[in-house]
Amino acid sequence: MTHPIDAACIFCKIVAGQIPCFKLLEDDNTIAFMDINPVNPGHALSVAKGHWPTIDLIPPPILADVAKTAQRVAKAVSKELKPVGVNLLQANGEGAGQSVPHLHFHILPRVAGDRASLNWAYKPGDMAAIKALCERLKAAL
């Protein structure tokens, strides 16, 4: 399969072998490598080989492959590093914290007390507002 590329994208350059990486694995549609700016040791990325910036643009079968690669890496991280937990993080757009506009998952091993700010405090929602929004979203599906 031919994958779309963006010559200016750092992940496209890694996929093309123009920039080195610490590669964990690779298949037809994905590549996984270590994050060189890790939150914790073992922080890795599962990346689509094609240039699709966000989840709404990537073909579903390739998204599934990226998720499968993330799962394989997460299993290896869990087995080898024995973290207290693992976050899988996939952000879409700058407002969501996406720093590289190329679809990818972070595989983030958690360490007790690491203070990585990925979680939020729970607060009760307005059930009527949640129900109304649910109906709007179901209509959009």
Image (cartoon, rainbow, N blue to C red):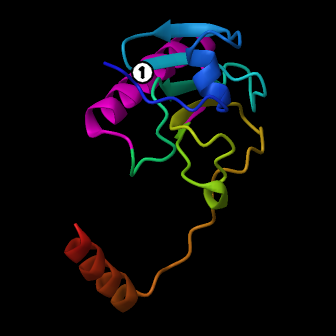
How far from the left and from the top, in percent, is residue 34? 66, 17
Which amino acid lies under the numbered mark 1 shown in the image of this protein? Thr
How far from the left and from the top, in percent, is residue 57? 39, 47
- Residue at 71% x, 31% y is 111
Q: Which residue is mark 1?
A: 69
Residue lying farthest bottom? Answer: 128
Residue 42 appears in view: yes
Q: Is residue 29 left or right of residue 83?
A: left
Q: Is residue 113 magenta?
A: no
Residue 83 is drawn in which quadrant?
top right
Quadrant of the image for the N terminus? Answer: top left
Q: Is residue 61 magenta?
A: yes
Residue 30 is drawn in which quadrant?
top left
Magenta span: chief secondary structure: helix
Q: Which residues are magenta?
A: 58-87
Q: Using a 10 Å C-alpha cutoff, classify the residue at mark 1 as few (fewer than 14 neighbours), some (14 to 19) or many (20 or more).
A: many
- Residue at 68% x, 28% y is 10
Q: Is residue 139 left or right of residue 78?
A: left
Quadrant of the image for the C terminus? Answer: bottom left
Residue 72 is drawn in which quadrant?
top left
- Residue at 40% x, 25% y is 3
Residue 84 appears in view: no
Residue 59 drawn above or below residue 81: below
Q: Is residue 76 left or right of residue 83?
A: left
Residue 92 drawn above or below residue 40: below
Residue 64 drawn above or below residue 16: below
How far from the left and from the top, in percent, is residue 102? 55, 38
Disc 1, SS? helix
